[in-house]
Image: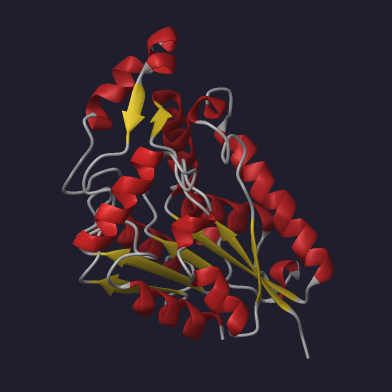
Amino acid sequence: MTSQAVLLVHGLGGTEYDLGMLGKQLRQAGFDAHTLTLPGHGGKPEDLLPVAWTEWLDAVRERYRALRASHDTVHLVGMCMGALLAVEAAKREGHGDAQTGNGGGGRLVALAPPVFIDGWSTPWYRFARHVVYRIAPLARRVRVNEEEPYGVKNDRLRAIVKNRLLRGDGFHYPWVPLTCIREVDRLRRNVMRGLDTIACPTLVVHAREDELTSLRSAHFLVDGINAANPGQASLVTLDNSYHMICVDNDRERVANSVLEFLR
């Protein structure tokens, strides 16, 4: 019997809770699911100030290599910024490439990947941020707050998320420095390049009503990966969630889609 590990990567300002019950569901299905806390996370928002996007990527690649050393197969699954990191790690590690043997035939899952920040509730910083980036002291002081609808369409769950943010119970930062958005922008630019080098089967799951990033992001990834190997990447579109698809109304469909794909 072969051992299969799944590396789950959370989003900006988040924790493993970004992925809801997916880790538990994977373990129940027989996978060895692992999470990691990205640099600057798990403490206070100010901890993110000195962190570069390359440090997040290095942390993912280091954990990926450790799992490769102890498992026959490793799958990469990322949510939001974690999806971008999973995609970039897959490119740089030759993940799933039969010639290199990396990942042992592992697969890649990108959940709500923000290749473009162009959702229907586009944040104020969509355009202004590039000007503020040029003024380093100001960029370090500007806070980007978590705001309604908090990525959640379900009214009851949204109220729970809001209360937990107000309590500051640590499941997600209530704000991130604008400098972090700059680092995500740098990550996004790298992700956009070389998608046709990804050699593993890939699943992208994205909500039609995602308020942060439109379906354009999902199609960009699928089309880019399929450019070299048509049909290698597929898309599941959700109709009853916003950005946080692992905890919103479609969470069971997300879990079932991921489980079916990895099996």
Point out the residue furthest to the right here.
69
The answer to whether residue 184 is left or right of residue 216 is: right
The one of 123 and 92 positioned closer to us in this rendering? 123
Q: Position of residue 144 (x, y in %)?
A: 33, 29
Quick one: quadrant of the C terminus?
A: bottom right
The one of 259 and 72 positioned closer to us in this rendering? 259
- Is residue 36 visible in the rendered image? The answer is yes
Q: Residue at x 31, y 55 (%)?
A: 160
Q: Position of residue 13 (x, y in %)?
A: 46, 41
- Is residue 216 visible in the rendered image? The answer is no
Point out the residue furthest to the front here.
167
**In the rendered image, the vertical position of residue 157 relative to residue 23, given as above or below:** above
Q: Residue at x 61, y 44 (%)?
A: 57
Name the image quarter holding residue 53: top right
Quick one: quadrant of the N terminus?
A: bottom right
The answer to whether residue 112 is left or right of residue 71 is: left
The one of 158 and 205 positioned closer to us in this rendering? 158
**In the rendered image, the vertical position of residue 65 relative to residue 56, given as above or below:** below
